Amino acid sequence: SGKGIKPIVLSMVYETFKNVSIPILASGGVQIATDVLEYLLAGASLVGIGTSQMMDPQLPRKVLRDLKHYLRKNKVQVKDLIGSVNRLNLNS
């Protein structure tokens, strides 16, 4: 769990999103709103915060506040972010 597993889980979410049409739940290494954004971009529909909140019980509230700020500032909705990395055509 934690930061060490995040790159692996991100990769798994990215690959899974390409092959299923059901919501994906991801967790592992979430400490800031950027972590949540990365999971959303890879294809997660729901992102969990686990071990990190044991060290800071207010962490989910802080992450949510920062995520809302990002969404408002960039005028984007969560549903528009989910899997958007998969929709990029990187070969063009």
Image (cartoon, rainbow, N blue to C red):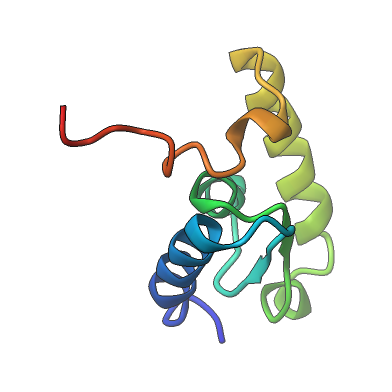
Quadrant housing the N terminus: bottom right
Q: Position of residue 63 (x, y in %)?
A: 71, 48
Residue furthest out toward the bottom: 1
Name above or below for residue 42 compared with residue 53: above
Q: How many marks?
A: 0
Quick check: 15 left or right of 64?
Answer: left
Residue at horizontal 71 percent and vertical 77 percent from the top: 55
Residue at horizontal 50 percent and vertical 36 percent from the top: 84
Quick check: 31 left or right of 66?
Answer: left
Name above or below for residue 1 compared with residue 7: below
Residue in the foreground of this view, choosing between 20 and 28 = 20
Residue at horizontal 41 percent and vertical 76 percent from the top: 8
Residue in the foreground of this view, choosing between 66 and 75 = 75
Name above or below for residue 1 compared with residue 70: below
Residue in the foreground of this view, choosing between 16 and 44 = 16
Quick check: 76 left or right of 87?
Answer: right
Residue 81 found in image quarter? top right
Residue at horizontal 48 percent and vertical 56 percent from the top: 18
Quadrant housing the C terminus: top left
Residue 26 found in image quarter? bottom right
Residue 28 found in image quarter? bottom right
Name above or below for residue 51 compared with residue 79: below
Q: Position of residue 69 (x, y in %)?
A: 70, 26
Q: Position of residue 7 (x, y in %)?
A: 39, 70
